[in-house]
Amino acid sequence: MSEQIVPVKTYIVVFAGLIGLTLLTTWVAFIDLGAFNTVVALVIAFCKMLLVIFFFMHLRHSGGLVRVVLLAGFFWLALLISLTMTDYRTRSWTPAPDAWSTNAPPTHP
Amino acid sequence: MSTATLEPRVQAPRNYLNAEYGWKSWLFTLDHKRIALLYMISITFFFMIGGFFAVLMRIHLIEPQGALVQPETYNKLFTLHGVIMIFFFLVPSIPTVLGNFLIPLMIGARDLAFPKLNLLSWYIYIVGGLFTLYSAIAGGVDTGWTFYTPYSSTYSNTQVTAVVVGVFINGFSSILTGLNFIVTIHKMRAPGLTWFRMPLFLWSIYATSIIMILGTPVLAISLFLLALEHLFHVGIFSPALGGDPLLFQHLFWFYSHPTVYIMILPAMGVVSEIIACFARKRIFGYKIVGFSSVAIAVLGFLVWGHHMFVTGQSVYAGLIFSFLSFLVAIPSAIKVFNWTSTLYKGSISYEAPMLYALGFIGLFTMGGLTGMFLASLATDVHLNGTYFIVAHFHYIMVGGAVMGYLGGIHFWWPKISGRKYPQGWAALAAAIIFIGFNLTFFPQFILGYLGMPRRYAFYPAEFQVLNVMSSAGASILGVGYLIPLIYFIWSMRYGPVAGANPWGAKGLEWQTSSPPPPENFTQIPVVTEEAYAYAAEEKTSRG
Amino acid sequence: MADTHSEHVQTKYAGLAHQFEDLAQQHDADTLGIWLFLVTEIMFFGGVFAAYAIFRWFYFAAFAGGSRLLDIRLGAINTVVLLGSSLTMALSVRSAQVGNRRALVLFLVLTMILGGAFLGVKAYEYHQKFVEHIVPSLDWAPEGEVLARLAPGGLDHAQLYFFFYFAMTGLHALHMIIGMGLLLWLVLRARKGSFTPDYFAPVEVVGLYWHFVDIVWIFLFPLLYLIGGRY
C-alpha cells in the first residue's frame, strides 16, 4: 500500500490533545460567559473533530477528491441549516395578525 | 444450454443471459446487467400498481360528485399513487435499469465498483416496496405522498408508520446506488476515457448520484422523526405542544425537491444520447451540457421553499427561494437549446427512440415553463393547491421522465436483449402515448387555472367536461403503455437478432456484442476519440 | 462465470475483486466509497442537529433546564471512553498496515471493550431517566426536585428537549451497536489471517465509520450536556 504509516507517538499525542480539549470544554461550561458558552463549546468541538479527521481518519494523507467530498458534505449541511434559518429568523419581521393564530409563534429577541 | 426453444437459427453465443440458468443465478447474481433486469421487472410491477391507482382516480373523477369511491378512499388512492410512482418507479427507473446496465459498458469496465452493494440495493428496494404494499393492503394511507404534519403525525389513523418505514428503507437503496455510481465513474474509466470524452448520459447519472447522496439522508431523518412523532406523540411537529409543522416540510422538501431532479436528469442524459445518434451529430456544446447537469444538481438544493410559499413560511424566505427557483431553470433551458442546436442541420431519422426524445423536448419544455409560473410568488399563491400543479409535475415526470425512460429502453433494447422490436408498433405506441398524455394533462392546466383544487374527491359541475377529457386521455395513455410491454416480450423470442450496433451509434457499449458477455468486454477497450464522433461519418455521407 | 480469470488473479493478489485492475484501484474505490457514505451520515445526523438547533433557539430556558439534569460526569467519562476507542481503532488499522496480526486483534478487541463501556454508561443514563420519570411519552411525570428544575421553562418544552436527547443519543447508540457488530466481524476475520499489509481495506473502512460515530458524539456532548451552562 502506498499509504504512509503514522507513528504510534503521533496517535498518542493527538489523543492527549483530544482529552485535553474535552476537559477544557467541560471546565468552561462551569464559567458564565453568556452567549459565548455556546460559541466556545462549538469551537472546541470543531477542533476535536479536525484532530480526528486529519489524524485518525488519515485525511492528511488522502487525495484531493476525498477532501472535496467531505467539504461538500459540510457545505450541504450548512445550506440546509442556513436556508431553513432564513425562514425562522425572518418570520417575526411580518408577524401574522393575532386573530389568525391560537398558538402564537415564539417571539424571540 | 438449451436450443430447443429457439427457432431454427444459430445458437446464441455466450452472453450474460444464457451464461447461467436457474433462479439462484438470478437472485444471487453480482452481474450489473442481470441486476438491471431485476430492477426493470420490479419497477414495471410497481408502475402497474401506481398506474392502477391512477386509473381508479380518473374513473372516479368522471362525475363531479365522484363516480367510484368514498372520499376517504380517494385520499388513499392519490397518496399511494404518489408514493409508489415517485419512490418505487420514477426515482429508481433510469438509474437502476439503464444506469446499472450501461455504466460499466459505457466506461469500459467489467462491473460497477461494488457489485455486492448493487445486489443489496435491489433487495433493500424490494423490502421497502413490500412495506409500502403492506401499508396499502392493511388499510392504506391518506396523508398525501408529502406526509404533511400534524395530520400525518398526530391525527391520521391510517398506516402511516408502515409506509414511512417502506420509504425510509427504500432510501438506502438510492444511497447505495448513487455511491456505487460515483465511485465507478471516478475510479474505473477505461484508458483514454477522460471526463470530457464520457457520454453525457454518464454526466447526468453522476449529477443524479450527487443528489442521491446528499439529499436522501435528509428524507430519512425527516421520516424517522415523523415516525417517532406518530408513535410517541411528542410534538416537534405539532403546534399544540410547541412544535412547528413547517420544520417537517423544510426537512422533507430539502430532499424532495432535489429528488425531482433525480427523476429528470437521467432522462435528459438519455435524450442526449438518442439525439446525438439519430441526428448523427455531436451534441452541441458538450461541455456546457455536462456542466449544466451538475449545475442543476447543485442549484436544485437551494429552491425547496417554493413548495411552501403559502404554508406560513416567512415572506422573506419566500423571496429568496423564488429568486433561486428562477435560477435553476437556466441550466435546464440551456440543455433544451443545445439539443435543438444539435438537431439543426443534423441527419435526422425518426426511429422510435427519436420519437420519444423529441416528445420529451416538447413536453419537458412545457412542464418547465409552467414551473416558472409557480416559481413566481404571486402567481403561486393563486395556483398552489390546484390542478395546475398536478399538470405541471406530470408534464415533467410523465411527459419528461417516463418518455425519457421509454426512449432509453427502446434505444438500448437491442443491446440488452440482443433483439429488435417492430418499428411500426413502436412508432404507433409512441404516438398513442403522446396523444393520450396531452389529452390527460393539458386540460388539467386549464382546470387549475380556473381554480379546481387538487386532492379533492369531488368538484364543481362546471369542471366536468375537462375532467372527462382528462379521464379519456388517461385510458388512451394506458393503452399506449401496454403496447410496448407486449412487443418487448414478443421480441425476446421472435424479434430479429440485433447485432452489436444496429443503430450505428457511437459509445463503448455498442462495441461489444448484443447481448454483452458476462464480463462485458473480451478486452478492455482503449478510448481514442471524443464522444459522439459522428462528424467524420457525416462528412463522408455528404460527399 | 469469469471464475478462472479471477481465481488466478486472486491467488496472486489476495482479496482483489474481479472488477478491479489492481489492489491500488480497489483501495481507492473503497476509500472513496466509505467517505461518500460518511457524507450521507453527515446529512442524516445533520438534519436532526438542525432541528435541535431550531428548538433550542425557540425554547432556550426549557432546554437549559433539561440539559442541567444530565449527569455531566458520565457524559465527560463517556466522551473520554469513546475517544479512547478511536485511539485503539486507529492503532488497529496501523497494526494491519504493518502486518502485526496479534496487535490488530488486540486493538480491535480493546475498541470493542471501550465501545461496550460507552453503551453500558448510556444504558445506565437511560435507566436514570426512567427513575426520574423524564422519558417523553413513555414515562413523563417529573416530580420533586426534577419538576422544580423543569417547570420554569415549561414542561411541554422540556419534554421536547428530552425527546431530542433520546432521539439523538439513541440514533448514535444504534450506530455504535452496528459498529460493534462490524468490529466483531473484523476480529473474526483478523484471527483467521485475512488481512495483510497489502489488503486490509475492511479494517480501514470500519475504522473510518467508527471515527465518524465518535465525531458525532464529540458534538452531542457539548450540545446536550454543556450548553445549558452549569454555573
Image (spheres, coloured by chain):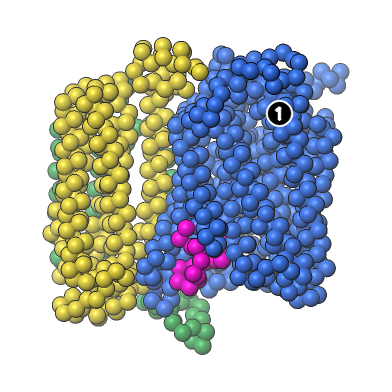
User: In the rendered image, what is the letter of the chain coloured yellow?
Assistant: C
- Specify the subunit that label 1 lies on: B
Residue B459 location (% of width, % of height): 73, 74
Percent x, y for residue C231? Answer: 15, 70
Find chain A in the image and tell me its colour. Answer: green
Quadrant showing the C terminus of chain B: top right
Is B153 magenta? The answer is yes
- Residue with the mark numbered 1: B492
Name the dominant secondary structure of the magenta segment: loop
Observer-nearest residue: C206 or C36? C206
Q: Is residue B542 above or below residue B349?
A: above
Residue kind at label 1, given as amino acid type: Met
Boundaries of the magenta span: B141-162
Residue at horizontal 25 percent and vertical 62 percent from the top? C224
Q: Which chain is blue?
A: B
B150 versus B96 height, above or below: below
Quick one: label 1, few (<14), some, or many (20+) residues within 10 Å? some
Most extreme residue toward the right is B543
**Measuring 29% from the left and 26% from the top, which residue is drawn there?**
C200
Describe the element under mark 1 as helix, strand or loop.
helix
Which percent across, then down, holds residue B345? 83, 33
What residue do we see at 62% from left, 35% from top? B98
